[in-house]
Image (cartoon, rainbow, N blue to C red):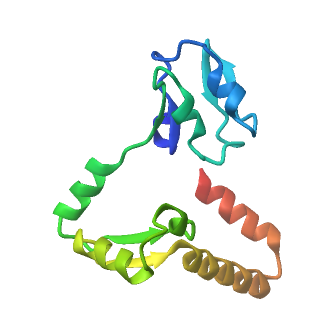
């Protein structure tokens, strides 16, 4: 369902003005079912479509309520911060941003790239031990179902 993607189209609000289609440099928007829909496999979620849509039919998913609910449960909630965070907070030092996130109630902050590196290492080790990418492919395919 598109509402679980970072950027989505509120189909009932779209008025087929095509402004988002014209402005998307990646051509990641196409008219489907009489509304300009985001082609998520091509989209990089830059948000330009949300800024140019005159009726605000293109929306950025808002998970604030879900995050607040997680934090209220007193579970250990960890933020996985994308390396691009620097472009969103250019005037903050790393330490300031981490301190602010922890002040909000998060237990820990980690950079997403570190997790990706760890997963890559584990996959590499698995493939070296099993000597078969086919087995790995089957496991991933089973996991994605």
Q: Indicate whether 46 appears above or below 123.
A: above
Residue at image coords 71%, 86%: 125
Could you say where residue 31 lies in the image, as x and y percent from the top left? 67, 19
Could you say where residue 138 lies in the image, as x and y percent from the top left? 72, 62
Residue at image coords 60%, 13%: 16
Could you say where residue 19 lies in the image, as x and y percent from the top left? 63, 22
80 with respect to 78 (left or right): right
Residue 92, quarter of picture? bottom left
Residue 69, quarter of picture? bottom left
The one nearer the camera, 115 or 142, is: 115
Q: Indicate whether 55 appears above or below 78.
A: above
Residue at image coords 55%, 77%: 115
Q: Indicate whether 8 appears above or below 143.
A: above
Could you say where residue 45 lies in the image, as x and y percent from the top left? 59, 46
Q: Is residue 1 visible?
A: no
47 with respect to 79 (left or right): right
Residue at image coords 77%, 82%: 130
Q: Is residue 46 visible?
A: yes
113 with respect to 70 (left or right): right
Q: How many marks?
A: 0
* Residue that protrudes farthest toward the front in the picture: 91
Residue 73, quarter of picture? bottom left
36 with respect to 132 (left or right): left
């Amino acid at each position: 369902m598109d509402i679980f993607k970072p950027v989505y189209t509120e189909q009932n609000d779209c008025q087929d003005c095509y402004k988002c289609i014209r402005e998307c440099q990646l051509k990641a928007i196409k008219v489907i079912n009489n509304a300009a829909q985001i082609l998520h496999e091509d989209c990089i979620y830059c948000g330009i479509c949300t800024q140019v849509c005159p009726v605000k039919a293109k929306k950025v998913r808002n998970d604030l309520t879900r995050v607040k609910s997680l934090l209220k449960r007193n579970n250990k909630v960890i933020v996985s911060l994308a390396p691009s965070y620097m472009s969103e907070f250019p005037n903050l030092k790393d330490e300031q941003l981490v301190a602010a996130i922890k002040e909000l109630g998060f237990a820990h902050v980690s950079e997403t790239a570190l997790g990706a590196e760890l997963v890559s290492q584990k996959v590499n080790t698995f493939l070296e031990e099993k000597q078969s990418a086919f087995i790995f492919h089957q496991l991933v395919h089973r996991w994605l179902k």
